[in-house]
Amino acid sequence: MNPIEALTAACDLAGKQVELAVGNPDAATPCTDFTVAQLVGHMVAALDGNSGMLGGATEGLDPFQPPTYPADEFVSQYAAAKERLVETVSKPGLMDALVEHPASPEPIPGAAAIMFPTFDMYVHAWDLAQANGTDFAGEGELFEMVNGFCRQNIGAEARQPGIIEAPVDPPAGATPMESLAAFLGRTWSP
């Protein structure tokens, strides 16, 4: 699976959870600062922010001051933002180009930069699944890519309250995804 395929797959997983989230916009999520509606707004802003950054623009929505959309706009706003990002990352030459990314002090290859929104959408798919009360196994090639990326790239310097918390112990018998969520500082008991 190449980085664009991984991004698309993660966005598709998240999109399925966004569709389910329409019915519970005020529900709490494992992202303690966000309700479902706020998390969907954050996801849209993050997709658009990455699209702008990878496309060479510096402006866009602030994912940490996200817009809040009415539930009947969740799917259309998310789908449009996903399409903008996929179109941006599909431009010839981006995968090999060096790009500026706020998570890195040095320019990084576009292929590596694409993994940031990939892991973000994948983990937020899990967050929404928890809020929606649906299963999210988190296994397979996409999970392995996201898990490896997170464990290799998220150290102490990347952890900030409300964004990526300090790691916590996973629950006994945790699934691979629950272990990754715990690594990212998420605790959840609906």
Image: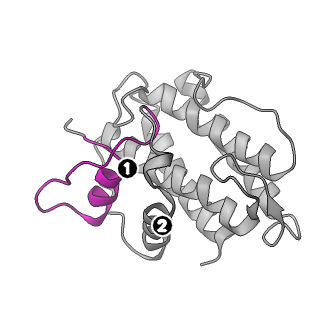
Question: Which amino acid lies under the numbered mark 2 shown in the image of this protein?
Answer: Gln
Q: Residue furthest left?
A: 172
Q: How many marks?
A: 2
Q: Residue at x 77, y 32 (%)?
A: 60
Q: Is residue 122 above or below residue 92?
A: above
Q: Nearer the viewer, residue 168 or 13?
A: 168
Dominant secondary structure, magenta: loop
Residue 59 in the magenta stretch? The answer is: no
- Is 31 left or right of 104, judged from the image as shown? left
- Residue 178: x, y in percent? 27, 56
- Is 184 left or right of 104, judged from the image as shown? left
Question: Which amino acid lies under the numbered mark 1 shown in the image of this protein?
Answer: Leu
Q: CA distance from mark 1 to mark 2?
A: 12 Å
* Residue for badge 1: 184
- Is 146 left or right of 62, judged from the image as shown? left
Q: Is residue 140 above or below residue 128?
A: below
- Residue 140: x, y in percent? 41, 75
Quadrant of the snapshot with the C terminus? top left
Start-end of magenta stretch: 162-187
Which image quarter: residue 79? top right
Closest to the camera, between mark 1 and mark 2, is: 2
Quadrant of the snapshot with the N terminus? bottom right
| N-term mark: 1 or 2 | 2
Which image quarter: residue 5? bottom right
**Crowding at label 1, few (<14), some or many (≥20) Cα neighbours within 10 Å?**
many
Q: Residue at x 36, y 70 (%)?
A: 139
Q: Check residue 152 in the rendering and tell me which mark sits there, or answer none.
A: 2
Which image quarter: residue 90? bottom right
Q: In the structure shown, which secondary structural element does the residue marked by tag 1 occupy?
A: loop
Q: What's the coloring here?
A: one colour
Q: Nearer the viewer, residue 61 or 157?
A: 157
Q: In the structure shown, which secondary structural element does the residue marked by tag 2 occupy?
A: helix
